[in-house]
Amino acid sequence: MYVAVKGGEKAIKNAHDWLSQIRRGNTKISEIRINQLSEQLTLSVDRIISEGSLYDRELAALALKQSRGDLIEAIFLIRAFRTTLPRLATSKPINTSKMICKRRISATFKDIPGGQNLGPTFDYTHRLLDGLKGPKNLVMDTETDRAEDLDMPKILDLLNKEGLIEDQIDTLEEPIDITRSSIQYPTTRAARLQALSRADEGFLLGLAYSTHRGYGGTHAFIGELRIGLVAVNVEIPELEITITVAEIEVTECETINQFTGSKTELAKFTRGYGLVMGQCERKAISMALVDRALRWKELGESYQNVPTQNEEFVISHCDNIQSTGFVEHIKLPHYVDFQSELELVRKIRSQQMKD
C-alpha cells in the first residue's frame, strides 16, 4: 500500500531540476549532439532500437542522451513513446536471403558462396585502449560498396540440399502480436521469438552461456551470422501493389545444433534462430541458443529441469522493462506495509519473551 508524502511535490520538482543539471554536466564543455550519439555510439543506439522495438536512430539517440547513458531507461523512454504512435500498416515479412550484408561469417564452413565478410567487428582487435595519445586521423572511404549483386545464399540451405538439417516448416498460422495480445502458455515458437527479440541482452547472454555449461543439453555451432540491410515492404491492397517503405539494419544468426533422428528418420542437425534489429550480434547469437534450448519438447528431447527449457520462466523474465518496473517499485514508500510487519515482529518477540 502506498501513501502520500507531505511536501513531495516540491521535493520531486527539486529532484527534476537537479537531474537536468547533472545530465547537462559542466557547461564549459560543449553539449553533446544527437547526431554524434547516433553516429559514434552506434551499438548503444542499436540496442535501444532492438529492445525498444522501434527502429528510429534519431529517437534512440535522443533517449540515450536524456537517460544519461542508462540503456534500460532509454529503452523505457522508447517503449513509452512507441505506445503513442498510430499503427498505419502491417509490413510483409522481411526477406533476409536478400540482405545487403556488411558482415557475414560462418564458424562451420570456411569456403562459402559469396565469401566470408568480416565487416566492422571487435573480434580481431587486441582490446587495448587506443585513445590515450589523442584522436587518430582517419581517412574515410567516401565510396561504400553495396553488395546487392553478390550471391550470398543462406549457408544452412546448402546443408538442407543434402538433407543434413531439419526443414523449416511454415505452419501458415497467423502469428500473434505480443505487443497487443498477452502470451498464453504453452505458447508458439513465433511468440517466443518475438519475446526473445526484444528481450534484455544481458539476460539472454546469461541463459545462452548456461546452455554451453550443461544447463540445456545442447551445443551449437554458428552456421551463419549476417548483419546488413533488408527492405521493409508494405502491401497496398487497393492498388494491388507492394512498395518498399524503408531499409533497416538487422542481425541474423542461425545455429547448427546436435542432430536428432529415430529408427524411421535419418539423423539430422537441428536449428536455432535469432533475429534482432540493428547490429546486435551478441544478442542474436544468444537468442538462437535459447530458442534451440526451448525447442526440447518439439524435438522429443528429455526435460532436464534447467531454466533454458522452462518456457514460462524464460519468457516471463526476459523483458527488462517489466523486470525494472518490479524491482524498482520497492523504492516507493511502503510505510503502511512495513509498519504492519513491524507490529507483527514486535508481537512475536513479545510472546517469545513471555514464554
Image (cartoon, helix red, strand yellow):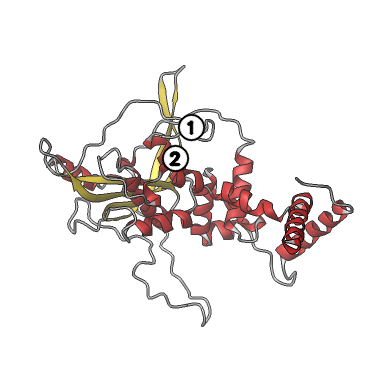
| Residue at the image point whose x is 65% and y is 61% from the top | 68
Q: Name above or below for residue 84 compared with residue 349.
A: above
| Residue at the image point whose x is 41% and y is 74% from the top | 127
Query: Considering depth in this image, is 252 or 189 the residue closer to the camera?
Result: 189
Query: Considering depth in this image, is 307 or 42 the residue closer to the camera?
Result: 307
Q: Are marks 1 and 2 in contact (CB under 8 Å)?
A: yes
| Residue at the image point whose x is 55% and y is 56% from the top | 38
- Residue 151 in sight from this viewpoint: no
Q: CA distance from mark 1 to mark 2?
A: 8 Å
Lateral position of residue 326 relative to residue 121, left or right: right
Neighbourhood count class around disc 2 (C-alpha, 10 Å): few under 14, some 14–19, many 20 upward: some
Lateral position of residue 354 relative to residue 171, left or right: right
Residue at which label 2 appears: 194
Where disc 1 sits, the SS reads: loop
Which amino acid lies under the numbered mark 2 shown in the image of this protein? Answer: Gln
Label placed on residue 177? 1
Q: Name above or below for residue 210 compared with residue 197.
A: below
